[in-house]
Image (cartoon, grey):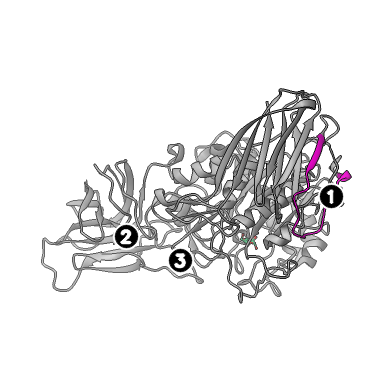
Amino acid sequence: MLGSSLLKILPLLAGVGHAVNLSVARDGGNASSPLMYGIMFEDINHSGDGGIYAELIQNRAFQGSIEFPSTLAPWEAVGNAKLSLQNNTVPLSSALPTSVNVAQGAGSRAGGVIGLQNPGWWGLSVKPQTYTGSFWALGSYKGQFTAKLQSATTSHVWASVQIKSECEQSKWVEHKFQFKPPVAAPDTNNTFVLEFNTGHGSVNFNLISLFPPTYNDRPNGNRPDLMKGLKGLKPSYFRIPGGNNIEGDTFNYRWKWNETIGPLTQRPGRPGTWGYENTDGLGLVEYLQWCEDLEVEPVLAVWSGVYLNGYNNANPDVIPEADIGIYVQDALNELEFIMGDVSTEYGALRASLGYPKPWKINYVEIGNEDNLSDPASYTSYRFMAFYDAIHAAYPDMKLISSTGDLTAVSGHSGTDYHEYARPNIYATQFGLWDNANRSHPILLGEYATIQGNKADPSTPVDWSGAEPRLQYPIWVGAVSEAIYTLGAERNGDIVIGASYAPGFQNLNDFQWSPDLVSFNADPDQVAFSTSYYAIQLLSSHRYTHTAPMTSDSGFGPAFYVAGVNSGTTEYTFKAAVYNTTAPIPFNIDFEGLKQGAKSKLTVLNAPSGLSYNVAGGQNVVKETVTELVAKKGGVFSFELKEYDIAVLTTF
Ligand code: AHR
């Protein structure tokens, strides 16, 4: 951070509108962060299953565990069928041993139709597009199966296809189908039906799947609406696969990369840490393809040897030092799977699954929030065991500890700092990194305003559960987060990136709010939050170097950073205004720009600090774009008012 050290940060008092007169120099700033704005992802709030992972069928393979036993829900019988879970002597696979048996219920007439139906993930969107389905069946049935999408309220059939049974008595056989509804359904209150004729004995089904078109037409891919939303955020990294969700609640429930790859029939799933079983259909390869699709850098977390034990962080299960090597080797195997030549054991495994071309990982995070889960063992042996082995194998890879401080760092590693706060707290943290120890990079891997302001502006967030969380990000929170990340931007020499967390929320079943993007089964109802639009504006405007500034006033109520593309006079100026009674006049000159030079000023604001976006509603964040012409002395003049977030770019 250079230049702006000349400027002081004023305390959090309601400010008045003193003019900010600024001179921005071209040279002498820092190279800006390589990652800066990114995305944090884990399966929380049905972000993956029932979320961005486009599979429409809920509980498609009856996966379960001791923590979350297999269940039939939400499947229901059709036509007097009797449904039961079975662990057949002939399982579909060792990973998917449980199937549903569909038999004729008592009193059914022979020749009638029976089957099962699924409501999707709290609804099914029906559009005139091609749906691709499949199911595995076991039995002696020789007739036709019928797969349908129909209304759950009127039974109107939107699409239907007949599939000839290829069933065999003691062998699981996959059946595939496609259909295309001619018209869209008016709502998502629809159901998927799979049925057949009685009189030929019962049939067992497993891995019953239905996909709509996916982003970039990836098989087993993602919802286009949510992926387009992420792409629109212009992110530069993707932190995967968590979050608490990588850790696992208790012994052996960690996220196991090798159980998330290969055919879906080979993925057993696992109990996630957010109250439900994960299918792991969204697995390691899918995450990497997602990074390709978004053109972002993966920041890959590897498990660091500690379980959450049902969030009882005081007493988690920890792998003892004598055994940690097993898990270090597992992390090395994972990295070899991703990056290894096909002549290596795990590179060959990757190639055998259809991916001969390796991916590249430049950033690995060792664990998640190990400052909360047994920090003593992390700093005494767990971090170094992973660090030493990965660094020896990949000397250029940037390794990140998960404590958020410097208690576990080594060599050129960095650390991942998480903070959830109130707006008034973030608004005081513009200078958080100005005087930080600059020996190791910092990733702001998780941040978000989760509760509103209190009369005492220093009130910390209440984690006790007594005070409810915000359901959606509010505008004043978005502005304060912008102040926080602008402070990070001007310290781009050590703060390498920042990601709002969590990324997604299925409004029908969530464990954490607020979230960056909220959604339900209807792609037309996605709510991109106020924070989303603030991040989008800041993330869409990058520069290669910070630009030193001199000013006649300190920071607050306006907070700002300037940048420039090295060797040019293409400047970017970003600002956020918080807590002022009057608009702030700005007069800015940029080195090398004269009278008549032009710039574009984009300003975001909302009707009030408490405004938020809801599913299916209008976006409350309003954008105003103005073209400015530099006056005498090359000065651009404009005003910003309370809760404005602004970006000015010269051209
Ligand atoms: O973002 C939600 C959760 O917050 C993450 O899983 C965890 O890392 C943090 O505590």
First in sequence: mark 1 vs mark 3: 3
Residue 53: mark in rendering: none
Q: Say if 56 sits above or below 110 in the image.
A: above
Q: Nearer the viewer, residue 225 or 606?
A: 606
Question: Residue 359 in the image: x percent, y percent?
Answer: 61, 37
What's the residue at 61%, 68% (across, down)? 251
Beta carbon at label 3 within 8 Å of ligand 1: no
Q: Which residue is mark 1?
A: 434
First in sequence: mark 3 vs mark 2: 3
| Tag 1 secondary structure | loop
- Marks 3/2 in contact by CB < 8 Å: the verdict is no
Q: Which residue is mark 3?
A: 64
| Tag 2 secondary structure | strand
- Marks 1/3 in contact by CB < 8 Å: the verdict is no
Q: Which residues are magenta?
A: 5-23
Q: Quadrant of the C terminus?
A: top right
Left or right of 20? Residue 336 is: left
Tell me the kind of residue under disc 1: Asp
Q: CA distance from mark 3 to mark 2?
A: 18 Å
Disc 3 vs disc 2: which is toward the camera? 2
